[in-house]
Structure formats: C-alpha cells, structure tokens
Amino acid sequence: MRIRRRRCCLIQIADQRLPDFAALFSGRVVFEDLVRADLLCPLSGERIALDAEDLRLIGTLSAREWTAAAELVQRGDASLQRLQDLVARGALVSDGEDDTSRRLREGEERMERIGWHDLAAVYHAFTRWRGIEGDEGKREHSAEAHRARLEEQVADHGPAPTHRPVRADALHTIALDVPAGDGDFVRSLRERTTTRAFALERWLERQRLQEVLYWTFGVQGKREFAPGLVALRKTSASGGGLHPIDPYLVALRVEGLESGLYHYDGYTHRLELLERVAQETLRQWVAASTIGQVYFAEAHACVVHVARFDRNHWKYRQHAKAYKAVLMDSAHLSQTLYLTATHLGLGAFYTAAINDGDIGDRLGLDPLSQAAVAISGFGIRATRTDSLHFDAQAHDPVAARADVL
C-alpha cells in the first residue's frame, strides 16, 4: 500500500468544551476545554479528528508523491494500524481499491479539473444543509413579537450598528438634488419589496410567468470568444459573461402548466419538465427546502438558482474570488426578478436559507459541479394586510438633513 496527504489539507485547531465526568459523578458541574484538531474534508463536509501523532505524520507526507506504507513502518514513523486507520477515515489517501480511497482520489481529481479554490471548496462543503428546519414559519410575526425579539437581541449583543454610517473625518458635505420620482421605472424601484403572503385561491397567468423568466433569465445576446466558449448577455451582470446560474422552475399554481419541477432553458426560452408533482406535495417540498418558511410555499412559482461551478471555475481556476462571483450572479438575478415582478404587478421573494443538499439530491445535482445557492419566488400578492410584509414608511432625504443637524 502506498499513501499520500490529502491535496486539500485544511486543519482546524479549536477548543472544545466538555463536561468533566469524574467531577459530575461526585456532584460537581465542571467543564474543561480540550484542544481538538480536525481535517476539514472539502468533498464530504466531514470533520476528521486528528491527534498530535496524526498531525506530525501528515506533516511529513507529500500530497503529490506516493510513499510506501512499509517504508514508514520500517523507519518507525507510524504503525501499520495507524496508517490503515487514517486511510479508512479519509485523513490520508492510499492507492488501494477500497471505496474510501477510490472516492477520495476521484473527488480530488474532479476538484482540480473543475478549478475549485481550496478555501472556497471547504466553505461550500461545510455550509451545505440537509434537513434543517428553522422557526421562521412557526413563530409569531406581529409587530410586538418582532420588537420583543429585537430587544432580546439588544440585551444579548448590544445595540445594532447605526443605520446611517457617516465619516467623522470628512472634509465637508455636499448636498445633492433629489431626482424626480415619476415614471414606471422609478415606480418599480420604489415598490420593490419582499412578499411573504400570496393569493392562494388565484392562478398566475402563464403570460406573466413567461415574462418573468425571459426578462430575468432569458438570453438576450451571445458572442463566441473562443472555440466552445460562448459568452452570454442577459439583463443582469455576470462575471466574464459566463452566467453560471441555471434556473429550475417550481411551478405551483400557473395557468396551463402542470405542477412540478422544470428546467428553464434561457437559450431557447423553453421549459423542460423533469418531474410531475401534485401541487400540495410540491408546496410541502418548497417549505422544507426553505427550512420551514411556509409562507414562501404560498408563491405561485419559484425558481431555484443552481450554480454551475464547473462553468465559472473553468475560466477563474482556483481563483480566490470565483466563489463570491457565483453568489453575486445569483444576487444580480434576484434584483432583476424583483423589479420585473414588481413591474408586472406581482410580489416576489429571495432566500438563501435553503436546504441546498436536499434540493441537489432531488434535482440530481453533483455538488462539486452544480449546487443550489438560493430560491426566488413570485406570484399574485395577497390583498390582505399581513404582518409578514415589510411596508416601510416614506423617507425624504432633504427633510432628514434638518433632522441630523
């Protein structure tokens, strides 16, 4: 057997607070801080515990060159049992044909081929959620309850940072003219808001669905910069014109459309039906996918933002900012969808609090090359007053100048 170090070998050393069981049995509650070291696996999102001897051994091995296990044993660097244990737990890679070693070798090769940055790969793996359920959909959302939660936050963490940051070292201030607030564009900007209550009894017209999809995710232009590399133009910005966010439609209550999961092909402006799902079952899946935010499941349609890391990282290989750029792409599309929906008289939302691991499993995504990063939703806004809506008071910046003097 030959072994080597993991190619992405990030180790976290942190204190772990554990109860002192000897003291507990004697009637005393005592906690002690123990130093724990973990190798953070960018493929599985698992923590692999290491002791001091493991760390010393790993530090002597190459990530590229194989070392014979027998040679390490003969030199007294490690016992064969320790090496086998580290290989079985995925802390080291062997050239054997066991499932763990084969999976690690193939996974690391794919990471390099796709072009992942090590730190981004670890962050991506360790922030992947499955089966998470928050209390957002169950807790009370009245103004009084919201205020009570914020007061508790202030008591625990102090006052919030100011909503109006200013520079004390500014040389002077310059008052700007406030633009005239009229026209459809300004109206859409001002009326853009997050909707958490939709008209469940109504159906969304197919025409409005088509417009939201086309003006948000549809291809408006293209250009081939190199053989096989086609840059796209959409109504939102994208790093390198790559547009790596792939939209998957969740059709809940749309006229003339079966409820189910679709892939939206923005290049041809067509929907590809992936799975027929009964409307109520689909609503339950949306609620579970958004960690229990049941009000989002009231939307008439949702769009899962699936990041194509292989497309983005192909150009920005092992780039420290590539992962951020993908998330920014999703944010750009979110704002465009908000404004398009508002222009069409619809409500909309966007959330990154999602069980991306579960969504990926349902859609058949490989998390190294594709993964859900957020969900947008839209539909006919409920006319009833709802405490979930953030209906802001109007603000006049000119009047505010007098207030802050």
Image (tube, helix red, strand yellow):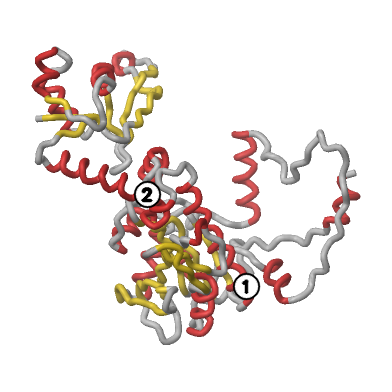
Q: Is residue 47 above or below residue 366?
A: above
Examine the image and state in which quarter residue 183 appears: bottom right
* Residues at discs 1 and 2 in contact (Cβ within 8 Å): no
Residue plotted at (48% across, 84% down):
206
The quadrant in which the C terminus is found is top right
Image vertical order of residue 128 relative to residue 39, above or below: below
Q: Mark 1 vs mark 2: which is more N-terminal? A: 2
The quarter of the picture where residue 13 lies is top left
Left or right: where does residue 379 sit relative to residue 403? left
Image position, residue 50 (x, y; %): 27, 24
- Kindly identify which residue carries mark 1: 342
Q: Is 223 placed above or below 28 here?
A: below
* Residue 91: % across, % down: 23, 31
Q: Position of residue 347 (x, y in %)?
A: 58, 71
Q: Amino acid at mark 1?
A: Thr
Depth check: 392 or 49 in front? Answer: 49
